[in-house]
Amino acid sequence: MKIAPRYLHKSLSFPEPSAEKAALLSSLEGAPGLVLVDHVEPHHKGGYRVLLEVDQVLLDDFITHMDAQGWMDGL
């Protein structure tokens, strides 16, 4: 299943955009159900829009993982 969330960190502020992107990519590593990170781009409202492919069966586990890592979908 392809999804394209806009991720924002709930509590951390980053000194520069590259640090935020690196932290996001680190959180995505090993996320349950993640099949592919296709594209990561800055969003004009802040955070990053990420085009992902996630195994639909593990979607809830994926969302729980990202939430536990401090990331929220900024839609």
Image (cartoon, rainbow, N blue to C red):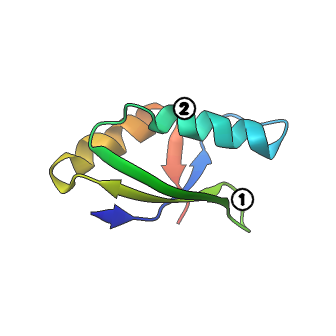
Q: CA distance from mark 2 to mark 1?
A: 18 Å
Which residue does the image show at 54% across and 59% down from the upper left?
39
Q: Is residue 13 visible?
A: no
Q: Indicate the quadrant where residue 25 lies.
A: top right
* Percent of width and height locating residue 69: 48, 32
| Residue at the extreme right of the image, as rendered | 15
Q: Quadrant of the N terminus?
A: bottom left
Which residue does the image show at 34% across and 57% down from the upper left?
53
The relative height of residue 2 versus residue 62 in the rendered view (above or below) is below
Identified by mark 1, the residue type is Gly
In the image shown, does 70 or 40 lie closer to the viewer?
40
The disc, 2 or 1, on the residue closer to the chain's N-terminal end is 2
* Percent of width and height locating residue 14: 77, 37
Q: Is residue 10 left or right of residue 60?
A: right
Q: Residues within 10 Å of mark 1 (few under 14, many from 20)?
A: few
Label 2 SS: helix
The relative height of residue 11 versus residue 49 in the rendered view (above or below) is above
Label 1 SS: loop
- Which disc is residue 46 wearing? 1
Q: Is residue 22 left or right of residue 14?
A: left
Q: How many marks?
A: 2
Identified by mark 2, the residue type is Ser
Of circles 2 and 1, which is in front? 2
Q: Indicate the quadrant where residue 48 lies.
A: bottom right
Which residue does the image show at 83% across and 41% down from the upper left?
16
Q: Which residue is mark 2?
A: 26
Q: Is residue 41 left or right of residue 72?
A: right
Q: Is residue 11 left or right of residue 4?
A: right
